[in-house]
Each structure stands twice: as structure tokens, then as C-alpha cells.
Amino acid sequence: EADIYQTPRYLVIGTGKKITLECSQTMGHDKMYWYQQDPGMELHLIHYSYGVNSTEKGDLSSESTVSRIRTEHFPLTLESARPSHTSQYLCASSEAGAGSNEQYFGPGTRLTVT
Amino acid sequence: QKEVEQNSGPLSVPEGAIASLNCTYSDRVSQSFFWYRQYSGKSPELIMSIYSNGDKEDGRFTAQLNKASQYVSLLIRDSQPSDSATYLCAVMMNYGGSQGNLIFGKGTKLSVKP
């Protein structure tokens, strides 16, 4: 079944730790995105990729980094987690064409940095 | 700054009534528009996309687009308590290096009372 997966779903980690949030999709999509969303707040795009070896920063400045070595995989890494990184991180994907750009979201990772 | 505006609500309607959610956008050349539903603590779920002026119906949902007035709306007929969620309006960007990305509104919280 075509889907988009994120792991872990919940993560509580101490300040200074390095973390990687995983995102994989079996949708066959070329475009992938990372959004950050605080409770009750709007979505902010932090990274996106239009294909393998293509990554760009989004509208919201983030200390995280991403990589796109395989079409289906788009991990996000924080080298040194801080309490200000506490948030929900949402991964999404869409088809490559210039048309619709319907984005489909994974279940999200809720990150808490203590 | 390109923007998508929504009334944050909460919008409260009785069960069985029609819920009307509105969204305005500032980018006059936008061509693609989306409505997402987000339950509390969950990720956004695409429920409607619309690209042409007029109405588009899908079950109990109708999206309406008026490009001249730069607004898009979502009507939910026969509202059910299970429709209680935050509804996000998203508009595809058509400028600069971020062309093809979505701008999300802050969302309207809908509450359907039994």
C-alpha cells in the first residue's frame, strides 16, 4: 500500500544529543518536504527536496539538516538538540509535475528536548 | 509577503447543519488550492483540491473558488461531530525558487455540536 512513514512517532531526548528523524514514502513521489508545527500553530516549511541530491531550505530558518540520497527517503538531522527544537515535525511528499502539487503527510514525529 | 488568511474560529455549528469555511489569498497568479483537515495531535489530511473557478463537490464537501476575488471556501453539508477538526487552506506558490511549494493558512477550528 502506498504510504508515507515517519519514525519515531514520539521522541524525548536530552539537550545536546544528535537525532535523526526518519521519513520514507512508497508513493513514488519525487518531491518531499519537512514542516514544523507547534501545538495550535500553523505549519512552517523548513526543508524541501525536488529529487535525489536536491535539498533546499524552506521559509522558516531551522538548525536542522536534510539529505536525499534515495528517492523514497528524506531524513532530517539535528546535530545538537535544544529545548527550542521541541515541536512536531511533519514529512510530506508530492508528485513531480508542475501541476497540482497535492501533498500527502506522514503521521509526524513529536519531539521533546529536555 | 504572500499570505493565506483564515478566520481562526472556533466555528461552532449544530449537527446536521452546513459549515462554511473561508480563505483568502494574496498571490493573484495562484492556480492550485487545497483544503486539509487536521484532527488534534494528528497530521493534516488532504480532503479537497480545486484548480478552476466554480464549485467542486466530493460527497458532503464542496470547494468553491473565485480567483477574481481571491477567495476559496469549503462547505461541509450535514455536519457530523466527527467533522470537528482544524481545517487548513493551502495555496500553491507561483514565484521565485519556491515555485510549487504550498503556503498554509493558520487554520479554522470547527466544532460540530451533537
Image (tube, coloured by chain):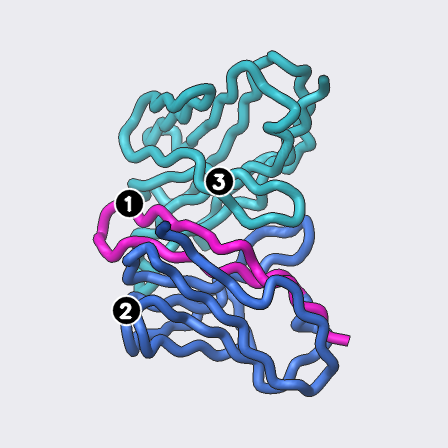
Q: Chain of mark 2?
A: A
- Give the numbered dot on residue B55: none
Query: Marks 2 and 3: CB-CB under 8 Å?
Result: no
Separation of residues labelled 1 and 3 (CA atoms): 14 Å
Q: Quadrant of residue A86?
A: bottom right
From the image, state whether disc 1 or disc 2 is nearer to you.
Answer: 2
* Residue lying at the far right of the rendered structure: A114
Residue located beneath label 3 in the image: B36
Q: Chain of mark 3?
A: B
Q: Considering the numbered disc 1 on the image, is that residue within a helix, a strand or a loop?
A: loop
Vertical placement of B79 versus B109: above or below?
above
Q: Is residue A103 left or right of residue B21?
A: left
Q: Considering the numbered disc 2 on the image, is that residue within a helix, a strand or a loop?
A: strand
User: Hey, what amino acid is under mark 1?
Assistant: Ser
The local crowd at label 3, few if under 14, some if 14 to 19, many if 20 or more residues have their Cα within 10 Å, is: many
Magenta region: which residues? A87-114
Residue located beneath label 1 in the image: A100
Q: Chain of mark 1?
A: A
Q: Position of residue A55 (x, y in %)?
A: 36, 74
Which residue: 38% across, 24% down? Answer: B58
Is A94 magenta? The answer is yes
Q: Considering the numbered disc 3 on the image, is that residue within a helix, a strand or a loop?
A: strand
Separation of residues labelled 2 and 3 (CA atoms): 24 Å
Is A17 magenta? The answer is no
Q: Quadrant of residue B29?
A: top left
Residue located beneath label 2 in the image: A51
Q: Which of these two is toward me, A91 or B51?
A: A91
